[in-house]
Image: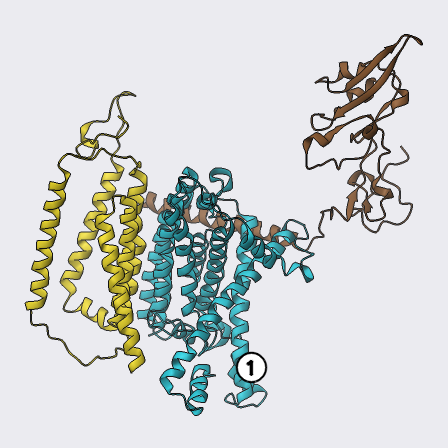
Amino acid sequence: MNSGIDLQGTFIQSLSDLGISAELAKVLWMPFPMLLMIIGATVGVLVNVWLERKISAAVQQRIGPEFAGPLGVLQPVADGLKLVFKEDITPANADPYLFTIGPILVVMPVFISYLIVPFGQNLVITNVNTGVFLWIAFSSVVPIGLLMSGYASNNKYSLIGGLRAAAQSISYEIPLALSVLAIVLMSNSLSTIDIVEQQSGYGILSWNVWRQPVGFVIFWISALAECERLPFDLPEAEEELVAGYQTEYSGMKFALFYIASYVNLVLSALLVAILYLGGWSSPIPIEVLSNLIGVDPATSWVQVVDASLGIGMTVLKAYFLVFLAIITRWTVPRVRIDQLLNLGWKFLLPIALANLLITAALKLAFPTAFGG
Amino acid sequence: MQIAEGVQLVTFGILSVLMLGAALGVVLFANIVYSAFLLGGVFISMAGIYILLNADFVSAAQILVYVGAVNVLILFAIMLVNKREDFKPLKNNWIRQGTTALVCAGLFTLLSTVSLVTPWAISTTTIPLASSIVPLAKHFFTDFLLPFELASILLLMSMVGAIILARRDFLPDSVGTSTPDSLTLPERPRELVGK
Amino acid sequence: MLKFLKQVIDYGKETAQAAKYIGQGLAVTFDHMQRRPVTVQYPYEKLIPSERFRGRIHFEFDKCISCEVCVRVCPINLPVVDYEFDKASKKKKLNSYSIDFGVCIFCGNCVEYCPTNCLSMTEEYELSTFDRHELNYDSVALGRLPTKVTDDPMVTALRTMAYLPKGVMSPRDLPAGAQRANSNE
């Protein structure tokens, strides 16, 4: 496996050639990935909102946004602008501090989790050892923000919505973590890079989804529940709770919740792609292809193609899963809160445990196929 | 390594101030919900200090377990029970507060003397660990096996206990009778402001 | 033990069945994605109201004999008929007539009972205003010639489902002179 393109190394190298010390060059490099992450996540959200509206329209035999830009692609931007300029209302008797901190606490961990999403061999912001574990840890901070905003709104619907959100994300975090653990068991590492590398041997055949079909389903269901997507959007069930914890919010604070939910959806889809669908690796390995046409895989243009194909593949897989989530939204009716908790604790949790045990047993029995 | 060291120092300072401030807030706020949220702040700054000590796994576990589970459950309990009532201030409240402050100050001096007197074996050379997960796991399954298993048995016991408590079926014989004393918290009733 | 095993098997079967049903549902949803939109792009396209559509009420001042039948048949006595008795001609002389469309339920009783047919239903349904008092139409407003969807050059008028030829589902791009189904009956 070649190392691919190393942007950071090249940047630091070229700056030190200009006479700047390597350390300062590293400091100068730092803002780029951060900015890239924020911009990438935001653009991902815009695309996601547009897709959601268009696909929902198609499913319901409507046209959807049409006039803002070609095919309505600028509609999410218009939505965002509208929310920015809307009046920001803090209800009377609400707790102004908690009311403001709540949405911020919801958004931040989701954006930070993008740190560990790799788009290629070196196209990751930090290749930390804790990898996916960091994501699970950060996503567990979100319910605190939801509880905070639910409590601070001084509205019983908000409070119930916040409590439901917290209950839901606590109970679905466990099957989620257990199915991730089965993957980690196979790749011997928590790092997302290592997890993708481990699946990149034989193209589509070596993807984890064939070795972990049960884990894949559990992970996807739990991820939908964590993102509060239909059929699990109980915290904001319109018919029961008006809009749950978002009831009293307007303007930019509401937009933060909105962004957080969509960023979270894209993030979950990206992580499913990384953990189960081979991340940046294409269905047919690029080495095989370049050997077919008789080009050395180490040539620079093949490297560039490889890197862009990696980004494209990751995004493509992620948006396929987003598409699946949107289709599911219009197919499955919302579950009740007791059905939701039953599904989490009595169905997904035992199956995830059994899946983990079976994976461990298979790893001992067939170390070649299940990561020795 | 000057910039890195400077960043480390500043981060340590910010984290310590945050942690101490949040901890004081937990104790001193009258509103119990604020205290619970600040407790989350304490846990998160503690996780930051773990990162400064090169213990990345422990810090992520700190966030997952303490912020994501323990603190959320505390908040849950508070929000399901807390009725936002204003209580009458107790008579001679300053005696209680003074005693608490005294005890706390005593404990603080005791602990700080202990930490100052103890000859800590500080190794000045930092060992950059490739991954702290594997050594942690090795410790868990070799020399720390017994404490690890005991802790898990303790957790299992508490879980079984919680389930038994939660499953206790209580059917009131007649509607309207007050709940028996065994189901109420042994707490002295306090008078409300309005009464 | 066997009973427990049976329970487990039944549970598994139920799960598989649930998964199957969700899969079927997804297939239905997916199938809908490739169908044509059924919606009408409102400000640019409008449906032609049917013949018996009950829209804004039209009133002809000169035909009215101030008999107040419309008031009596109205469920809420809504029309306001302001007249005075002209002693010279021994007839009622109408001063003004008004209906508040913010209150009217468009039941059409007044139109039905009007002895001189001075009240009639129009196709107009775009009555929204910024102030509800503007919905109180006086005899001048009620007497305005109703607009028709088919006369508006800005609007593509579309036929509703019942007025399409047999087997045609989309009102767009109909051949000229296409007759509705069962039109000869």
Q: Which residue position is annotated with label 1?
A: A305
- Give the vertical position of A120 relative to A14 (above or below): above
Image quarter in which the C terminus of chain A is found: bottom left
Shown colour of chain C = brown
Where disc 1 sits, the SS reads: helix
Q: A131 or A71: nearer the eye?
A: A71
Report whether A332 appears left or right of A198: right
Q: Position of residue B106 (x, y in %)?
A: 8, 54
Q: B152 or A90: nearer the eye?
A: A90
* Residue depicted at 79% across the width and 17% down the height: C81
> Visible in this render: residue A134?
yes
* Residue depicted at 79% across the width and 40% down the height: C160
Q: How many marks?
A: 1
- Give the vertical position of C166 relative to C66 (above or below): below
Q: Position of residue A88 (x, y in %)?
A: 49, 49
**In terms of image quadrants, where is residue A34?**
bottom left
The chain whose colour is yellow is B
